[in-house]
Amino acid sequence: MKERIFGWREMKDHRSVRTIIYIVLGFVMYLAMVDNVMPEKLDIRPFSIAPEDILSPVTTVDGEATKEKQNEAAAAVAPKYTFKQTTALVQIEKANAIYDTAIKIAQQKKAITSSTDANGGQADTTNETEKVSTEEKISLLKSNLSQNIVEELPKTTLKSLVTTQPSDLTIAKEITGTTLNAVMAKQIKWGELAKAKRSVNEVFPESSLPPSLKKAAEAITKQLIVPNYVLNAKKTKQARQEAIESVDPVLIQEGQILAKKGQVINHQMYHQIEVAGLLDDSFNPYPYLGLGILVFLLMAFVSYETSGLESKVRSGNTYVLMYGLVMFVTFLLMKITSLLSEFHVHGLIFLVPAAVGTMLIRLLISERLAITTSFVLAVCASILFNESTLAIMNFTFGIYVLFSCLAGAVLIGKRNARPRILKTGLMVSLVNILVVLIFLFLKTSQLAVFDVVLSLGFAFLAGFLSSVLTLGFMPFFEVAFGILSTMRLIELSNPNHPLLRKILTEAPGTYHHSVMVANLAEAACEAIGANGLLARVAAYYHDIGKTKRPRFFIENQMGMENPHDKISPQLSRTVILSHPYDGAIMLREHRLPKEIVDIAEQHHGTTLLSFFYNKALQSGAADVSESEFRYPGPKVQTKEAAVIEIADSVEAATRSLSKPKPEKIESLVRKIITARLEDGQFDECQLTLKELDTVAQSICETLKGIFHSRIEYPEVDWKKKVGHA
């Protein structure tokens, strides 16, 4: 089934496939959570009966009530007034202008009221001309005064002004100015204007003025008194704006009871229910938009993390598809568990096996991505399991899922055999129980013992269920995607595997050689940070091709006649050079992982079969080419393959040492590595010179342990001992 899912072999290298996978995964996440971000809609009308307690799902502002409260605050602000002291001076100037005009007109009295007779004498025509001239004076005075003053002053006042002596007018001018200044020295509002004018009679000083002029002066004074404490529109507006801004918004709090069960819903309640977004005829697009942005950020975060993983994850989209399928399965399990909350069993939501997602990702891809996914699942779980709270996110449950997922990602370790997965499930259960206890103890309310037991029991089952599901899903991903997991490697290392039994029964010498190479390669790979388990298992299978003609390889001859002695070097070359590729074919037929097949095919690289090449030269055959006696390759592509190539050569070479002392062993190992390096066998892998030195040291240490010195025991005559017994 490897890479057969929906033609994945043809699609996996397309650059746009990764984006499509993330879009589909984001769409699945969005669909799973969209129901949880929308508040419940109610089909109610004004003056209907509330079917149940109606609570606000959010904290929101009641704009209409807030506006009404602001208007009340603005109306309560008293108008702001400004005392204009210059108003009195202006009015005094107006009074002075009236009296000055009257004095000028009064000074023209003789010219107007006297005339000359025919003899050049003075004719007394006072009575007749006085009447005419007074009207003229009044008309002249009116023409020199402003229209509003003329209209508001009675005619008697005007007449008194034009018929009075200038000296009296001067006195009246001073008295009027003094009175105006005294009255308008106080603050006068429009509503206090009449009172201020009446006060003129009280403050008007006693004088020797003619009664008519005094009355006229009082009239002019009263007329010129105006408000000097006037409304300041700018300050009033500013004060009212400050009052509006000081009003706190009217909030409908989350969890606030908008209407109790059985209560008649009045207009105010209906308005609050509408503001809270609970009416079925209202549509609020913002939760949809907010959830979309959240999913986009989560997918961007995951995409960034996957792009930073090791090269084998970046090289193709297989791991991205696998990640998407794991997340789909995890979301499906979380959604199903969230729907179980409708049964109203206390603590049932703690049964969610969210850790299965991070455990699978840790086993199949990497630990870092599993840790990253823990946070993603925690955020999504806080939305999926928000039934027990009025908020959009249930942060308490999100923390529970976070710890559960982190425990699954971190505690599973490197050696991921089936017993280890079950053990990890138990540890996840323990973490779940501890987190639930934290939540229960932090509550101030009394705890029912039965409810506590239920919550802890479901938390325990969640960890156990996660491990069981992980064990169940692992074979599917391994077979479908050809994933070489640690658990798969451990299974392949079982001696009962058909291919290993084939080597053991048909080529026992090769089997022993493979085990020795496995020991050397695993220790060396662990020393340089490569996959030691992969090296060990691949070493078991690397010479499987020798089982096709086992007697042509010296380790399987065991004292028998060497068949190469009877055939030409060219035929021997063909037999020997074919075993890596025969082995690769056999491994592919048994559907072993690609990594193991590649190592079997590459473990000789393009090295020279020097023994038979020299034999061919010595035989005197014409046209002997070195390239004909080299393995076709390819050269080793990974660190594990390079280490196995070195270990394979070293193990075979050490057999020729009669007395394998440490100095000889180290010299031999160094020579083999140097020869391979100079031959360019490591040009296509990422093995550094420093790592080659580490590999050499590790192999030497392992070989020294194998060929350590032993005590020579004296010979014992067992027959004598048995007879004596």
Image (cartoon, rainbow, N blue to C red):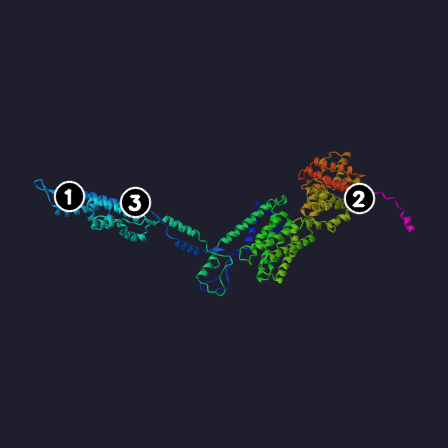
Which residue bears the numbered disc 1? 112
Q: Is residue 707 magenta?
A: yes
- The amino acid pointed to by label 3 is Leu
Q: Residues within 10 Å of mark 1 (few under 14, many from 20)?
A: some
Separation (CA) of disc 2 from disc 3 = 135 Å
Q: Is residue 225 magenta?
A: no
The answer to whether residue 534 is left or right of residue 15 is right
* Number of the front mark, 1 or 2: 1
Which residue bears the numbered disc 3? 89
Residue 280 visible in the displayed image = no
Q: Check the image and name the residue furthest to the left.
A: 119
Provide the secondary structure element on which disc 2 rests: loop
Q: At 44% from the left edge and 53% from the top edge, which residue is drawn?
A: 247
Expressed as whole percent of the image width and height from the top left, the position of residue 70 reads 42, 54
Sequence-first tag of 1 and 3:
3
- Please say if 118 is above or below 55: above
Which residue bears the numbered disc 2? 557
**Which quadrant holds residue 330?**
bottom right
Label total for image:
3
Expressed as whole percent of the image width and height from the top left, the position of residue 626 reads 72, 35
- The amino acid pointed to by label 1 is Ile
* Number of the front mark, 2 or 3: 3
Q: Which residue is more in the foreground, 396 or 181?
A: 181
Q: At 78% from the left edge and 43% from the top edge, which residue is drawn?
A: 706
Q: Which residue is more in the foreground, 135 or 177?
A: 177
- The amino acid pointed to by label 2 is Gln
Q: Which residues are magenta?
A: 705-725
